[in-house]
Image: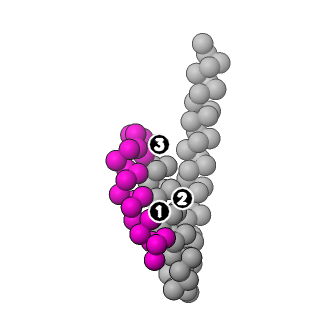
């Protein structure tokens, strides 16, 4: 129960401090991951809901990785053209 309360507190606090763009998306993804982890810790659900949550978490992870790779590539191109 404490984990859910902490996850909800983070979910309200993180977007307020996040920048626009990729940083905001990363903060939202991290907040959602914390909520999902709290639900897993409780272990109150199973089956389709749990599978769906895990698939969404995997998708968020892949998208986060792609954003970081894209930003690293942009930065290296900008550095090379200076």
Q: Residues within 10 Å of mark 3 (few under 14, many from 20)?
A: some
Q: CA distance from mark 2 to mark 3?
A: 13 Å
Residue 52 visible in rendering: no
N-terminal label among 2 and 1: 1
Question: Which secondary structure class fits the magenta region best?
Answer: helix
Q: Residue beneath label 3, please?
A: 22
Q: CA distance from mark 3 to mark 1?
A: 15 Å
Residue drawn where x is 42% and y is 58% of the image: 10
Q: Residue 34, how many percent across, how many down?
A: 51, 63
Residue 20, magenta (yes or no): yes
Up/down of 57 relative to 77, above or below: below
Marks 2 and 1 sit apart, C-alpha to C-alpha, by 9 Å
Magenta segment, which residues?
1-24
Which residue is under mark 2?
A: 60
Q: Position of residue 46 (x, y in %)?
A: 55, 86
Residue nearer the viewer, 82 or 1: 1
Vertically, is 2 above or below 19? below
| Residue at horizontal 45 percent and vertical 77 percent from the top | 1
């Amino acid at each position: 129960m404490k984990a859910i309360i902490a996850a909800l507190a983070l979910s309200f606090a993180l977007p307020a401090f996040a920048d626009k763009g990729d940083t905001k998306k990363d903060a939202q993804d991290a907040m959602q991951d914390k909520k999902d982890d709290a639900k897993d810790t409780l272990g109150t659900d199973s089956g389709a809901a749990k599978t769906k949550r895990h698939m969404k978490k995997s998708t968020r992870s892949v998208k986060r990785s792609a954003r970081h790779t894209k930003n690293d590539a942009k930065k290296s191109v900008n550095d090379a053209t200076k």
